[in-house]
């Protein structure tokens, strides 16, 4: 058996997210079926993060064990030939058999795109949250920086989440104007709770609209109360941009 590390990009529109669900098409299902067809047997593909329905990825990382030996460049082409055009393997490489894309990840980065103008381009509507009201980007940036560090993020976790433990370390949390009407939020951390990034964004937008002060982020964190935070931002603006490991991941012995 050979453990293969895959780096993937996908458009989450119309998909139920990474993880297989009872109904709907998932990214995991598509990649497992493509790899299974190549290997001639059922396979399991494990990802670094379980992105939700409608969320996109530019650099998702996953692993799969294959019995068949295929040169990495050929493997990328062979898997992509069996995937819809909205899901693509960007890179493949053999790694040690104990490699785990989730547990071995040291840093994950998400980007959230907000289109802040009266009208949104039809080419942006599936990849940004349309917020036509004026936003104070400077205040949003101040509020974003307040959550950097190690905290209990219970206030930004989806209600009913079964994740064990709610303490996470956020290394970077920043808001920038991306030109024209685009406002971009980027956050890097050692891990994220369910809906954590989208709830942070929903709260930052309330700060930008003047409904909350930038200092309220600290108070929300301390409360550990989901009811104190803002709404959950829609999924279409969220991208998993990359996952970092202790590089280089050593190649498996041959």
Image (cartoon, grey):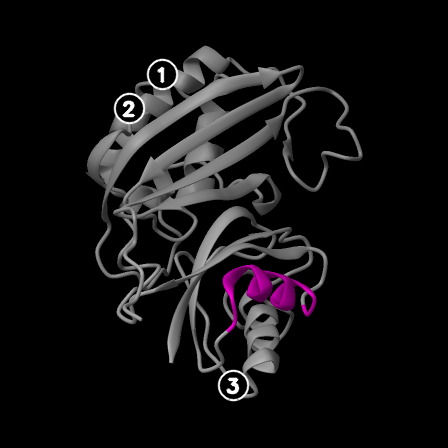
Dot 2 or dot 3: first in sequence order is: 3
Residue drawn 30% across and 54% down?
A: 249
Residue 138 appears at what percent x and percent y?
44, 11
Give yes or no for residue 20 being in the magenta stretch. Answer: no
Q: Position of residue 10 (x, y in %)?
A: 61, 52
**Residue 109 picture quarter:** top left
The segment highlighted magenta reads: 70-82
Please tell me which residue lies in front, 150 or 231: 150
> Is residue 211 visible to us here?
no
Q: Earlier in the sequence, mark 1 or mark 3?
A: 3
| Circles 2, 3 touching at the beta carbon (< 8 Å) | no
The residue tagged 1 is: 142
- Label annotation for residue 146: 2
Main SS of residues in magenta: helix
Secondary element under disc 1, as helix, strand or loop, is: helix
Q: Residue at x 34, y 51 (%)?
A: 193
CA distance separating discs 2 and 3? 46 Å
Mark 3, residue position? 42
- Helix or strand or loop: what does disc 3 sit on? loop
């Amino acid at each position: 058996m050979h453990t293969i590390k895959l780096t993937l990009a996908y458009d989450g529109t119309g998909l139920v997210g990474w993880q297989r669900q009872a109904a709907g098409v998932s990214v995991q299902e598509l990649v497992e079926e493509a790899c299974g067809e190549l290997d001639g047997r059922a396979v399991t593909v494990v990802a670094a993060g379980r992105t939700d329905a409608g969320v996109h990825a530019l650099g998702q990382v996953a692993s799969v064990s294959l019995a068949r030996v295929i040169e990495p460049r050929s493997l990328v082409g062979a898997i992509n030939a069996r995937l819809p055009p909205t899901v693509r393997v960007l890179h493949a490489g053999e790694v040690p058999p104990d490699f785990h894309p989730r547990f071995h990840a040291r840093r994950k980065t998400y980007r959230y795109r907000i289109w802040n103008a009266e009208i949104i381009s039809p080419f942006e509507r599936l990849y940004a949250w349309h917020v036509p009201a004026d936003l104070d980007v400077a205040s949003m940036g101040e509020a974003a920086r307040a959550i950097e560090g190690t905290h209990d993020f219970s206030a930004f976790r989806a209600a009913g989440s079964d994740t064990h433990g709610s303490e996470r370390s956020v290394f970077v949390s920043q808001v920038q104007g991306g030109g024209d009407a685009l406002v971009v939020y980027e956050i890097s951390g050692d891990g994220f709770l369910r809906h954590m990034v989208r709830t942070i964004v929903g709260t930052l937008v309330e700060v930008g609209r003047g409904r909350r002060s930038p200092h309220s982020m600290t108070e929300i964190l301390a409360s550990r109360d989901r009811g104190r935070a803002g709404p959950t931002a829609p999924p279409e603006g969220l991208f998993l941009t990359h996952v970092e490991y202790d590089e280089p991941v050593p190649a498996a012995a041959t």
